[in-house]
Image (spheres, rainbow, N blue to C red):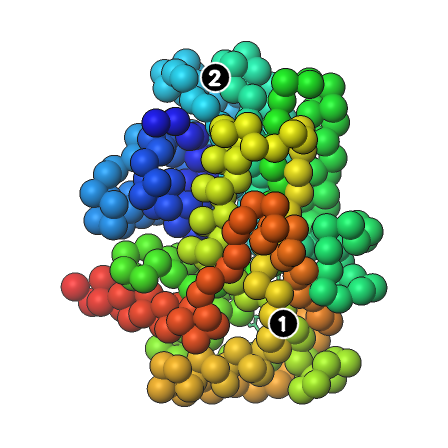
Amino acid sequence: MAKILVTGGTGYIGSHTVVELQKEGYEVVVIDNLSNSNIEVLNGIEKITGIRPAFENIDCVDYVSLDRTFEKHINIDAVIHFAASKAVGESVEKPLLYYRNNLVSLINLLQLMPIHKIKKLVFSSSCTVYGQPDVLPVTEEAPIKPALSPYGNTKQISEEIIRDTVHANPCFQGIILRYFNPIGAHASAEIGELPNGVPNNLLPFVTQTAMGLRDELKVFGDDYDTPDGSCIRDYIHVVDLAKAHVVSVKRMLDKKSGQQLETFNLGTGLGLSVLEIIRNFERVNNVKVPYKIVGRREGDIEKVWADPSRANNVLGWKAAETIDETLRSAWAWEKHLKEIKSS
Ligand code: UD1
């Protein structure tokens, strides 16, 4: 079976992808510098699949260590590159850190892959590249809008770096996946999102508030041009997202694509508002989420949801989990975290 290198494999989306790869029989090598994750995630992966992936604690910004890793783990067939910094606010405060972490790591990988005869890359991009789209649902053909943060800019520049590299190397192949809003956790509750400190994203804030770890959730704005005034996003179960990576890798390894570079939206196609998420979460989990409406958050997009038809038709992938199941899994994971902390 093919061997896949997963950078950022102990992170939120990375760890769920490692599980799905292993379930499909792939051998996985994980690289992570553990800057925003925990080594114990490997235990969670092992509990689910019975297999502990090979692990290297290295930073992809470190060219020499990355080179050594490729020398040690020979015959890698494809790379899935998750490792990146992802906090939008932090990127505004520390832009150079973000440009360095997110761009140098990608450049190192793209330089080293051909040296080690690896020609296939799956890259984690984001719907952030669309900014506020003019037409909804948004397709992959929508124009790329000026980035609102250094983080968003690193995703746009990364896509360009990959495009130019593929163009210059006819034997190189890449798939760019533009994620909408990943939420939820593995059904076993053995792995999930592990936010460092105060969460930035909505769902960890919702679960922590429901658990009583935070007094109340701040809803950023109720005066948007949406039915209930709060922002709309396309929330996708992280396991559905993970499965799309497996399909993407398989597509390249099976030589199903005649194209060198393909880009896919990974979303459900369903837009939900912040208030709808809160209400659904309360209903399916039978818990209260105290919240208060506050002012808009700077840089927020009003509404965005995916047209996932290209991924549905070309990859043969479709988001399968319901929002109810997804919100249940997020709550089960928060409860699991509480058990771990109290034991
Ligand atoms: C953000 C980034 C996006 C990035 C993603 C990474 C922006 C503009 N976008 O997406 O580029 O890929 O994180 O995960 O920052 N909300 C609240 N209260 C909270 C937290 C969030 O009301 O405490 C609202 C936000 O206003 C937004 C929605 O919940 O409407 C989702 O927010 P979030 O989870 O942070 O994701 P995005 O902002 O969509």
Q: Is residue 24 left or right of residue 103?
A: left
Amino acid type at circle 1 is Gly
- x%, y% of residue 308? 63, 57
- The numbered dot on residue 96 is none
Q: Position of residue 84 (x, y in %)?
A: 55, 42
> Residue at 45% of width from left, 49% of height from top?
243
Q: Residue at x 37, y 46 (%)?
A: 20
Residue 322 horizontal side relative to residue 113, left or right: left
**Badges 2 and 1: C-beta atoms under 8 Å apart?**
no
Q: Position of residue 31 (x, y in %)?
A: 41, 32
Ligand 1 in which quarter: bottom right
Work out how far the residue at label 2 is from the one at label 1, CA to CA, in angstroms: 42 Å
* Residue toward you, 75 or 287: 75
Location of residue 157 (image quadrant):
top right
**Residue 271 bears which disc, if any?**
1
Q: Is residue 338 above or below residue 109?
A: below
Residue 114 appears in view: yes
Q: Secondary structure at mark 2?
A: helix
Residue at left 56%, top 21%?
Answer: 119
Read off the residue under disc 2: 67
How many C-alpha atoms fall within 10 Å of the one at disc 2: few (<14), some, or many (≥20)?
some
Mark 2: amino acid: Asp
Ranked by sequence position, the earlier of labels 2 and 1 is 2
Q: Does residue 90 appear anywhere in the picture?
A: no
